[in-house]
Amino acid sequence: MVVLLGILVSLTLWLSAPGLFGLAEDGPGTATVTATVRKGVGCSGAGSGEIVTFVHEGSEHQATLDACGHRAGESVDVGMPAEVGTNMTVHAAEAATGESDARRPVAFVLFLLACFAGGGFAYLYGRKGTRSGALC
């Protein structure tokens, strides 16, 4: 019974929040482009971000990269926003919210295994008094 409850909780989470475990498609609105750092910022102090340039549809755009520690002239993959404007802030492509890789589905499988293990333990613990020597 407890194992079925664990499965029900897992399915409810999966259906109500598919992005929780990375099983949903990433939302539209960002494309990964290669940008060149024009002005780097050190990580020791709070700065306003680094200045990067990237080419989109044949024209060069400038944006603020929400990062630190890059050198001028270094290439960085960034997530470009859907609408290209004048005061843009971009993020490193690997660190952008919604980035989905192999870790999230693995987290879902581990969550399911934890539900099964917890349900099995509860079942065995509930049967503790019915058979002598089953559990200490």
Image (cartoon, rainbow, N blue to C red):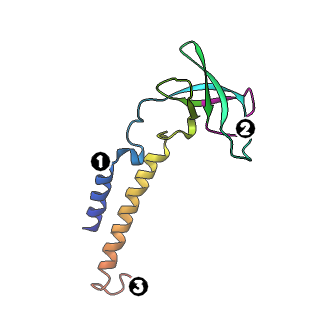
Q: Find disc 3 in the rendering and name its residue.
A: 136
Q: Tell me the SS state at disc 3.
A: loop
Residue 3 in which image quadrant: bottom left
Q: Position of residue 123 (x, y in %)?
A: 31, 73
Count neighbours of disc 3 (C-alpha within 10 A) and say few if under 14, some if 14 to 19, many if 20 or more. Answer: few
Q: Is residue 77 above or below residue 130?
A: above
Give whichever of discs 1 and 3 has the lower sequence position.
1
In front of the other: label 1 or label 3? 1
Q: Closer to the observer: label 2 or label 3?
A: 2
Quadrant of the image occupied by residue 133: bottom left
Q: Position of residue 39 (x, y in %)?
A: 72, 30
Q: Amino acid at mark 3?
A: Cys
If you read the primary sequence from the N terminus, does the residue marked by circle 2 or circle 1 appear first? 1
Tell me the element at label 2: loop
Nearest to the eye among marks 2 and 1: give it: 2
Position of residue 50 relative to residue 83, above or below, is below
Q: Which residues are magenta?
A: 66-77
SS assignment for the magenta stretch, majority: loop
Q: Residues within 10 Å of mark 1 (few under 14, many from 20)?
A: few
Location of the C terminus by quadrant is bottom left
> Front-most of 122 and 76?
76
Q: Is residue 47 covered in magenta?
A: no
